[in-house]
Image: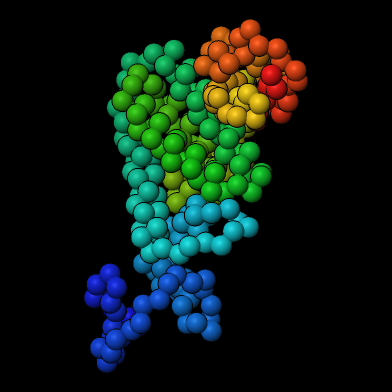
Amino acid sequence: AEVEKTSEKRAIKRSDKSKVTVGPSESMSKSKKNTIDPEVMIKQYGADSVRWFILSDSPPEKDIQWSDTGVISSCKFLQKIWNLNQLILKRAEKEIDKAEEKKFNIQIDLHVYKIDSAINNFQFNVAIANFYQIYKYFNDMISLRLSNQTLIENITKIMKLMIPFTPHLAHECLSNLNDKELNKWPEINKEAFKNVMINMVIQINGKTRDVLNIKKDLTENEVNKSIKKFSKAYKYLNDKKILRTIFIKNKIINYII
């Protein structure tokens, strides 16, 4: 607040217009007087925006690279979430397509599962990345033939998942959605587990030849079948003698030929 940036590499003191030396980025420290006063950011953008940015930037065990523009982006995204809620509440009812509704419910349940898992594993930045995907998915699907009730039930699940990250926004949205069970965590649909996809790394003699998107928790035999059918790595295995196979479930399979 005491400094005014006049160009990319030049800054002056606001008080006497004297030159300020611009150095490299450093960790916040009171002795260096380069800390950010959270009160200023909270007054300007709200506590939810500041919290959202801090949790989205990096895992809890790593240092955060502070960025005012990051907080501004967080504030804009949370405004989009608010607008999405309003859009759903004011949406006119449409003719329903049961197949589209089923597909929509499965996708939301899948994201709910992913976010719940990320929170339990303290991967808050991963959870937030999924919220961005969910917002895009809702935006793409809101014009399709889904019932308002389906949209409201699913956006309610998402807002409950956002309570640990943005409690003020989430509670306000849930109040507007007329939810009576604010303290009840969304149920995890076990059917959604069947639709979880992972990237399996396929290696030949330690060299990556393909990355195959397959269902989670497949056995080694099932992975072998998928590689034979769908992977470009199979051409390196065809007619070759496999001496040993190193298989790590949901991560990697390495053929020694």
Residue 207, position as x, y percentages in the image: 60, 29
Residue at the image position 32 percent from the left and 37 percent from the top = 87
- Colour mapping used in the image: rainbow
Residue, far right: 244
Residue 217, position as x, y percentages in the image: 68, 23
Residue at the image position 64 percent from the left and 49 percent from the top = 122
Tell me, yes or no, if residue 75 can be seen here: no
Quadrant that contains the N terminus: bottom left
Residue at the image position 50 percent from the left and 82 percent from the top = 32
Identify the image quadrant of residue 74. bottom left
Relative horizontal placement of residue 65, taking residue 238 as reference (left or right): left
67 versus 126 height, above or below: below
Identify the image quadrant of residue 243. top right
Q: Nearer the viewer, residue 181 or 80?
A: 80
Relative horizontal placement of residue 233, taking residue 240 as reference (left or right): left
Q: Nearer the viewer, residue 84 or 1?
A: 1
125 versus 102 height, above or below: below
34 versus 207 height, above or below: below
Tell me, yes or no, if residue 234 can be seen here: yes
Quadrant that contains the C terminus: top right
Residue 234, position as x, y percentages in the image: 57, 14
